[in-house]
Amino acid sequence: MPKIAVTRWIPDEALEVLRTVGEVVVSPVDRPLTPEELREFVAGSSAVVSMLHDRVDGPVVDAAGDGLRVVANVAVGYDNVDVAALAGRDVVVTNTPGVLTEATADLTFGLLLAITRRLGEGERLVRAERPWSFHLGFLLGSGLQGRTLGIVGPGQIGRAVAARAAAFGMRIVYSGRSRKPDFPGEFVPFEELLARADIVSLHCPLTQDTRHLIDATALRAMKPGAYLVNTTRGPVVDESALADALEAGEIAGAALDVFEAEPDVEPRLLSREDVVLTPHLGSATAETRTAMAVLAARNVASVLAGAEPLTKVTP
Ligand code: GLV
Ligand code: GLV
């Protein structure tokens, strides 16, 4: 039986699929493997089921040996995988698009509401048992009706966010590499999106082009009352520049589900009331995480059976 290395816990439903095609070895430690541990762990495997915190590059493939045929990343994003290096070694890479679209769009809206309606601040206040009473000026936020949402990256998740925004009565502008004929919003250049959006929500993948897309210049181009929401990948935002912009009052607030150096967070953001911080929960529903792992397992099963995977990443 071919060896299948799974770098962290996955649901039983996915393990069952994998066990039909190989001998499954799951990492026994409840933390990301170090690069050295990862190289040791994958040795001799035909398939690797990887997590978004694993850096899967040429040396990892070389450590696996000549038998490696597929790396199934349990995430839609695959910035952690050196796809070109793997393609050069004839290793198939797969990801998990589609199954996490709705969960991530829901979480995006959760963050959007949390930051504009000051839910984190209110929650902290109640828990601190500080005295408070309802009055007409108490903890006022801003509404979504009639506001403009700027969607950066009109992929599947961006589209699902747009559908929710329409239900909230928001106007939608979007930017990306190209206009999408049936996207429910106005296609605008990125600079115009920054200038017009009351809330900027990031849904582009992390690539060389999008690393620090939101930098000091972009933050200064946003409206003073605007909010930033990031549910894609931390490095799309320059976290230090974001802290500067908040300190300078250049934007009104930010809600982040992802961080530049996860799980670390820019320390200046931690104490701010105008920031909402969640620990990479975009796809974190039980049903979605199971669907992601099962899709990754089916991709492994397909490749090991000599068939095309369901959701292959192309370099
Ligand atoms: C999660 O962040 C994913 O890319 O699936
Ligand atoms: C980003 O998600 C895109 O497809 O443009």
Image (spheres, rainbow, N blue to C red):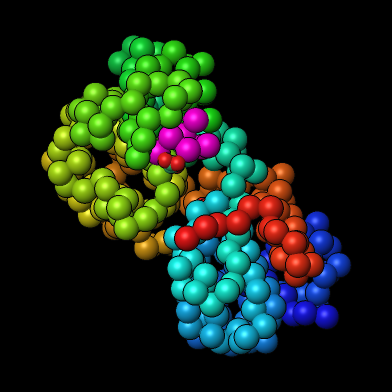
* Residue at 81 percent of width and 61 percent of height: 17
Q: Which of 250 and 205 is in front in this view?
A: 205
Q: Is residue 43 visible in this depiction of the protein?
A: yes
**How far across and down, in percent of the image, does residue 4 sit?**
72, 75
**How far across and down, in percent of the image, does residue 166 sit?**
47, 17
**Is 139 rendered above or below residue 263?**
above
Q: How many marks?
A: 0
Left or right: where does residue 285 sit relative to residue 143? Answer: right
Q: Is residue 28 visible in this depiction of the protein?
A: no
* Residue at 40 percent of width and 21 percent of height: 185
Q: Which of 275 and 286 is in front in this view?
A: 286
The quarter of the displayed image where residue 75 is located:
bottom right
Q: Is residue 154 magenta?
A: yes
**Is 127 rendered above or below residue 14?**
above
Q: Nearer the viewer, residue 138 or 303?
A: 303
The quarter of the displayed image where residue 136 is located:
top left
* Residue at 53 percent of width and 30 percent of height: 160
Furthest-right residue in view?
20
Q: Quadrant of the N terminus?
A: bottom right
What's drawn in magenta, residue-wise?
152-159
**How far across and down, in percent of the image, does residue 208 sit?**
32, 58
**How far across and down, in percent of the image, does residue 62 sit?**
54, 85
Q: Does the magenta stretch include residue 197?
A: no
**Is 96 rendered above or below residue 274?**
below
Q: In which quarter of the image is ligand 2?
A: top left
